[in-house]
Amino acid sequence: MSQAKNVGIVGVKAPEKACNDKNCPFHGNLRVRGMIFEGKLIKFRANKTGVFERVYLYYNSKYKRYERRRSRIRVHIPPCLDVKEGDNVIIGECRPIAKSVSFVVLGKVSS
């Protein structure tokens, strides 16, 4: 098994467990570039794929106040990471892995 790589994101440590997933940013050849988000993993039922949700504030200029909005993003979850539904995670953008998957989970956020 190859040693875990540094993905270059501050606050993200490489996992101790190894895997042979080619779409793992730590043990495969997947590059992380672009946007980085922090939020909650709400679904993890498919094989190595889950749904990530982030809640953010949007300013509505007509009513001059903020409203809460959410967006759901499909993410790839490498098998070397021990995450489950309900965990706060950090994700990073990568090349398209599937039709709707262009993000990968980088790790848990310490609470």
Image: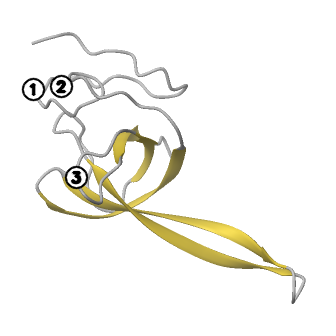
Q: Is residue 62 left or right of residue 48?
A: right
Residue 82 image point, x, y percent: 23, 41
The amino acid marked with disc number 1 is Asn
Does the residue at mark 3 contact the one at mark 2 (Cβ under 8 Å)?
no
In this view, 5 is above or below 23: above
In the rendered structure, are the residues bearing label 3 and label 1 in contact, judged by CB atoms less than 8 Å apart? no
Q: Position of residue 54 (x, y in %)?
A: 51, 63
Residue that badge 3 annotates = 98
Earlier sequence position, callout 3 versus callout 1: 1
Residue at image point 52% right, 38% down: 34
Q: Secondary structure at mark 2?
A: loop
Work out whether residue 73 or residue 19 is closer to the camera in this orientation and state it: 73
State the residue lying farthest toward the right: 64
Quadrant position of residue 46: bottom left
Front tag of 1 and 2: 1
Whichever of labels 3 and 2 marks the residue nearer the N terminus, that label is: 2
Q: Which residue is mark 1?
A: 20
- When the figure is inspected, residue 17 is found, relative to residue 93, above or below; the finding is above
Q: Amino acid at mark 3?
A: Ala
Q: Which residue is mark 2?
A: 17
Q: Total of numbered circles in the picture?
A: 3
Residue 62 horizontal side relative to residue 79, left or right: right
| Residue sitting at x 52%, y 48% | 37
In the figure, is residue 14 to the left or right of 11? left
**Three-letter amino acid code at disc 2?**
Lys
How does the figure colour the protein chain or chains?
Answer: secondary structure
